[in-house]
Image (spheres, rainbow, N blue to C red):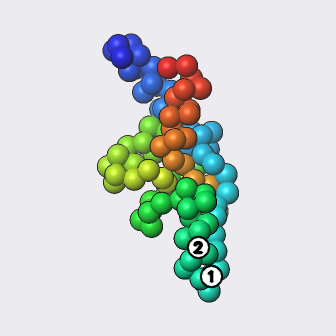
Amino acid sequence: MTASGEGSVSSALTETAVSEAMHKGLFTCAADTPLSSAAQTMTGERIAGMEFLTVDADESLERAAQMMADHELTHLIVLDPQSAKAIGVLSTHDLAGAIASEGL
């Protein structure tokens, strides 16, 4: 990738909000759900890992990508900045999709 291409990617990530790339909604289960059922849901939905960090929906994708890299994570829980409630998930796949949609 050329230096100008790298700048374009950085600019796109800086100017794009997490809310524009995230998956809306979360998968949850009740506290009394059998472990085998929870594991089956996780497998079916390709959910991995129990450690998580949160990011506000209005934060930049650049900041979210840096958080993922710093903590070696592939997903962040996205929070509504007004209510602080979880509203979705941002994955490395979502980041790649955002970059691809910019044609970079």
Q: Are marks 2 and 1 in contact (CB under 8 Å)?
A: yes
Q: Is residue 64 visible?
A: yes
Residue 11 position within the rendered picture, expressed as x and y whole percent measured from the top left: 46, 25
Gap in Å between the C-alphas at discs 2 and 1? Answer: 7 Å
Query: Mark 2: which amino acid?
Result: Ala
Q: Please rate how many residues cluster around mark 1, counting C-alpha atoms within 10 Å: few if below 14, some from 14 to 19, many from 20.
A: few
Q: Nearer the viewer, residue 34 or 86?
A: 34
User: The residue tagged with tag 2: helix, strand or loop?
Assistant: helix
Residue 72 position within the rendered picture, expressed as x and y whole percent measured from the top left: 34, 52
Q: Relative to residue 1, is residue 46 drawn left or right? A: right
Residue 17 quadrant = top right
* Residue ID at (51%, 47%): 91
Q: Is residue 84 visible?
A: no
As displayed, is residue 88 above or below residue 102?
below
Question: Quarter holding the N terminus?
Answer: top left
Q: Nearer the viewer, residue 35 or 83?
A: 35
* Residue ID at (58%, 73%): 38
Q: Which residue is farthest right?
A: 25
Residue 44 position within the rendered picture, expressed as x and y whole percent measured from the top left: 61, 60
Q: Nearer the viewer, residue 103 or 18?
A: 103
* Residue ID at (56%, 33%): 97
* Residue ID at (48%, 60%): 48
Q: Relative to residue 69, is residue 38 drawn left or right? A: right
Q: Nearer the viewer, residue 73 or 10?
A: 73
First along the sequence among labels 2 and 1: 1
* Mark 2 lies on residue: 38
* Mark 1 lies on residue: 33
Residue 37 quadrant = bottom right
Residue 32 position within the rendered picture, expressed as x and y whole percent measured from the top left: 62, 86
Q: Which residue is farthest bottom?
A: 32
Query: Mark 1: which amino acid?
Result: Thr
